[in-house]
Amino acid sequence: ERKASLAASTGPGATSDGHKVPLLANVGGPADVPAAVEAGAEGVGLFRTEFLFLDDSTKAPSEEKQVEAYRKVLEAFPEGRVVVRVLDAGADKPLDFLTPGDEPNPALGVRGLRSLLDHPEVLRTQLTALAKAVEGLPVYLEVMAPMVADRIDAKAFADACREAGLQAKFGAMVEIPSAALRARSILQEVEFLSLGTNDLAQYAFAADRQVGAVSRLQDPWQPALLDLVALSAEAAKAEGKSCGVCGEAASDPLLACVLTGLGVTSLSMGAASIPYVRATLGKYTLAQCERAASAARAADTADEARKAAQAVLSGE
Ligand code: PEP
Ligand code: MG
C-alpha cells in the first residue's frame, strides 16, 4: 500500500483540497542535485554552500570556482526556485580563516552571518559569484543568511546583497528565538523567512544539537518550538511574505502537515523524504492540518503533541 501511495505521489506539493505547499530539496552541492530532481523537488529550499569551503580551511574558494558550482545547481531547476544560503561557518562547522579559535561557547559566538559581517570580503565574493552564476538563467534565485538575530543583522545582509548588485530575493533564516519573536521587524528588511528548526530548537532549549544526552529537547515536536514556528509564519502572513521550513522538522510527514497548519508556506528536506511528505500532505485538507496544528500546540510535551496531531488526522 505504501508503494502504491508513493507511486501516486507526483506533482507539486499540496493538501487534498489544493492548498499548495512547494516541496523543495536541501542540497549540499551539485552532487545532490540528481536525487532532488528524481524525487520531483520543485526547487531547492536550502543550498548549504559550506561544502565549497571544506577543501581548504585556510582561505575562501575563488570567485570562478564558486560561480561554477552555483551555476550547476541553478541550471538544474529551470523555472524553479533555488534558495542559496550564504556560508554558515563556525560552531559545528569551523573554518580556520573565519572562525575565532578561542571562544568559550562557539555556538554562541561568531558564527553564521556574524563571521561574514566580520569578513565582508568573503560575503562580497560569494554574492558576486551568485550574481554571475544566475545571469541568463530563468531560475528564481533567493539568497538567505544563517543566524540572523535581529533587524540590524537583516539590514546588514540585505545591504550587502544590494551592494553586490544581486538580482534576487533576500531572506533571513529564523534559527534564533529572538528572530522568531520579532519576525515582523526582520521582515521590514528582507522578503522571506526560512526556519532552520535544528538550530532554532538548539537555541530555544539551550540543548546542543550535537549532544545526544539532551536529544529529548531537540525533538521538533516540542510545543515551544511549534509556538516559535507559528509566530514566524503569522508575522510573514501579516507582511504578505513567505515563511518556509528547511530544518529536519520538514522531513517528518506528520509534522509537515502540522507545519502547514501553522502557516508555513514551503517545506525543504533531504530528497529521500519528499515522496513521503507529498503523499501524506495530499491526504488531508488545509483545515485538517490547521486542527492538527492547534491540537499539537495545546499539548505539553513532544510526545503528546505528536499523538494529538495523529489523533486529529486519523479522525479519532
Ligand atoms: C537548521 O539549523 O535547521 C538548518 C537548516 O541549518 P543547518 O542544519 O545547516 O545548521
Ligand atoms: Mg542552522
Image: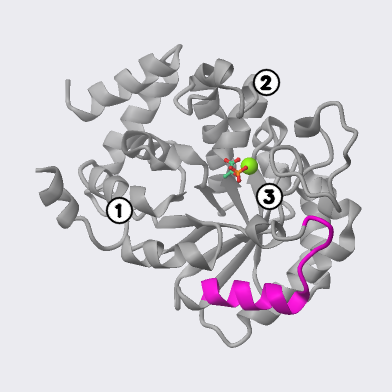
Q: Who is closer to the viewer here, 197 or 259?
A: 197
Percent position of residue 131, x then y: 70, 77
Mark 3 or mark 2, whichever is nearer to me = 2
Q: Who is closer to the viewer here, 272 or 186?
A: 272
Mark 2 or mark 1, whichever is nearer to me = 2
- For the record, the magenta segment spans 57-74
Q: Which residue is mark 2?
A: 206
Q: Quadrant of residue 195?
A: top right
Separation of residues labelled 3 and 2 (CA atoms)? 25 Å
Residue 14 - label: 1
- The residue sitting at 70% across, 36% down in the picture is 182
Residue 187 - label: 3
Task: Tell me if mark 2 has few (under 14), some (14-19) or many (20+) residues whose alpha carbon lies within 10 angstroms of its own.
Answer: few
Badge 3 residue CB within 8 Å of ligand 1: no
- The residue sitting at 37% across, 37% down in the picture is 252
- Dot 3 falls on a residue whose secondary structure is loop
Percent position of residue 193, x then y: 60, 49
Q: Who is closer to the viewer here, 236 or 90?
A: 90
Judge left or right: residue 155 versus residue 229.
right
Task: Tell me if mark 1 has few (under 14), some (14-19) or many (20+) residues whose alpha carbon lies within 10 angstroms of its own.
Answer: many
- Dot 1 falls on a residue whose secondary structure is loop
Mark 3 or mark 1, whichever is nearer to me = 1
Chain-order first, disc 3 or disc 2: 3
Quadrant that contains the N terminus: top left
* Amino acid type for the residue under numbered disc 3: Leu
Residue contact between numbered discs 3 and 1, judged by CB atoms under 8 Å:
no
Q: Is residue 110 visible?
A: yes
Chain-order first, disc 3 or disc 1: 1
Badge 1 residue CB within 8 Å of ligand 1: no
- Dot 2 falls on a residue whose secondary structure is loop
